Amino acid sequence: MHRRLIVPSVLAASFLLAIPASAATYSPGAPGIGDPYYPASGNGGYDVSHYDLRLKYQPKTDLLEGTATILATTKQDLSRFNLDFGLKVSEIRVNGKKAAFTTSGTQELEITPAAALPKGSAVTVVVRYAGKPSELEINGFTAWHRTPDGGVAAQEPDSAVWWFPSNDHPLDKATYDVSVQVPNGTQAISNGVLQGTRPVGSDWTRYSWRSNKPQASYLATLAVGKFDITTDKTATGLPVLNAYSKDLGDNAGAARASIERTGEVAEWLEEVFGPYPFNALGGYVPNVPSGYALETQTRPFYSPRQFANGSNVSVVVHELAHQWYGDSVSVDGWKDIWVNEGFARYSQWLWSEREGEGTAQELADYVYASHPADDEFWTVKPGDPGPENQFHLAVYDRGALALQALRNEIGDESFFKILKGWPSEHAYGNAKVGDFVKYAERVSGKPLAALFDTWLYQAAKPGSPAARSAEV
Ligand code: ARG
Ligand code: ZN
């Protein structure tokens, strides 16, 4: 009975709401989030809170297909917006209604919803897609590693574009549910806690993972392949899950001997950096030919080559240190990479110190002496290395030298107070190099701008970061 009365008022309301859509306040979201190193990374106009990725992957053909459901909030009156993505999209719905879309570049997906989106509103975007990630090349590069038994997405600063649509920049972190259907006998590894596995028909199994703390898109990972999985609990009861490709050859033993110490390393890092920021731990080693490692959230990626010379607990220390320095506290822009790599490297020096394999000062002296003043190494400024040098050795080693210089300047008490305070000061957020300098000045009560300028921003070899005890 009342319906007849209500319907016209609903129409009237939606008519009124529709008026601003044509007004000048509605504009397209920017196609980049504003990072000078990577202008196309991320997008403007909205903030994602959650990604739900429901996928299917066939290792034989490298076909990845599925649906991404993205929950976001608009930050401006939006007439359209972009996602970063490279695979072929078949349908997009925004708030349940089909939306128009175009792929305007190799990684920009431009979406025009049926109705414009007012600032501050909740938006649900459903993207259906399918494609072979190995066939997607951007500037001649692919972040997707094919393996004999599957594929892996683990790359910095970008890998999301190869497997799910996102606002691909650390400034927009979100929680994740990643559920992937793979052929029986094959596993799908991702971040966080394995919520469960279940059969799909007689030939497939679905693996469902949940990462329940804010996570940057480059720290989301997917690996499909044949893995041996080990599980355990830490002393505080957090689940540890490690996964090793069944095909690691001679590196298998050393990989396990290193990664099985994840719980022990995390316990030690908690003493240095404070409480572990996430609710799961682990590591995985797919059979990729590459050589690097990556701090994918809760579950770092390790190339088998990391273990070619035997055990390498140091790389485990590095990737776990990133869980505090990089994953919980993330770069504000990619030029801030030192707040990740300088600290992860320095934590390896601290581990060495603890293991009696050389103090941080000894390692600093060695690194300092091994690069003569005319070495190109000193031309890279860790505080602003440029995109081409983002992962230059200097960001790591000169970056750690900067921390040794800081330690010598302010003393151990203030130094370790800072190492532990910073991750809680900016937990689950973003921070700039300049924020760290200010924080270190505040905690130590000393002016430090000149020290950091010398170590992070000059293209020249600084004076030796000598220990105070050596000066006495
Ligand atoms: N954050 C990673 C690490 O230090 C670096 C990965 C760099 N990527 C690369 N392809 N080298 O462990
Ligand atoms: Zn690192």
Image: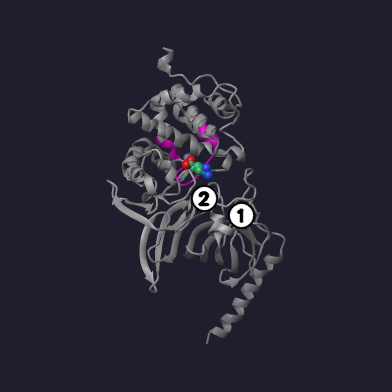
Which residue is labeled 1 in the image?
137
**Residue 272 at least partly seen:** yes
User: Does mark 2 have its CB less than 8 Å from ligand 1?
Assistant: no
Q: Amino acid at mark 2?
A: Tyr
Say the numbered circle drawn on residue 460.
Answer: none
Q: Residue at x 61, y 40 (%)?
A: 387
The Cα atoms of the two marked residues, 1 and 2, are separated by 17 Å
Q: Residue at x 42, y 39 (%)?
A: 318
Q: Is residue 22 above or below residue 12?
A: above
Residue 287 placement (x, y as % from top left):
44, 51
**Is residue 436 rendered to the left or right of residue 349?**
right
Q: Amino acid at mark 1?
A: Glu
Bounds of the magenta segment: 420-437
Q: Residue furthest front?
A: 250
Q: Residue furthest bottom?
A: 1
Q: Residue at x 48, y 64 (%)?
A: 60
Q: Secondary structure at mark 1?
A: loop
Near mark 2 (Cα within 10 A), the count class, few <14, some 14-19 or many ≥20, is many
Q: Residue furthest left?
A: 235
Residue 174 placement (x, y as % from top left):
49, 54
Going from the N terminus, do you reach mark 1 or mark 2 first?
1
Q: Secondary structure at mark 2?
A: helix
- Front residue of 303/424: it is 303
**Residue 424 at least partly seen:** no
Residue 347 placement (x, y as % from top left):
41, 34
Near mark 1 (Cα within 10 A), the count class, few <14, some 14-19 or many ≥20, is some
- Front residue of 440/318: it is 318
Which residue is labeled 2 in the image?
218
Q: Is residue 235 above or below residue 57?
A: above
Q: Is residue 342 above or below residue 263?
A: above
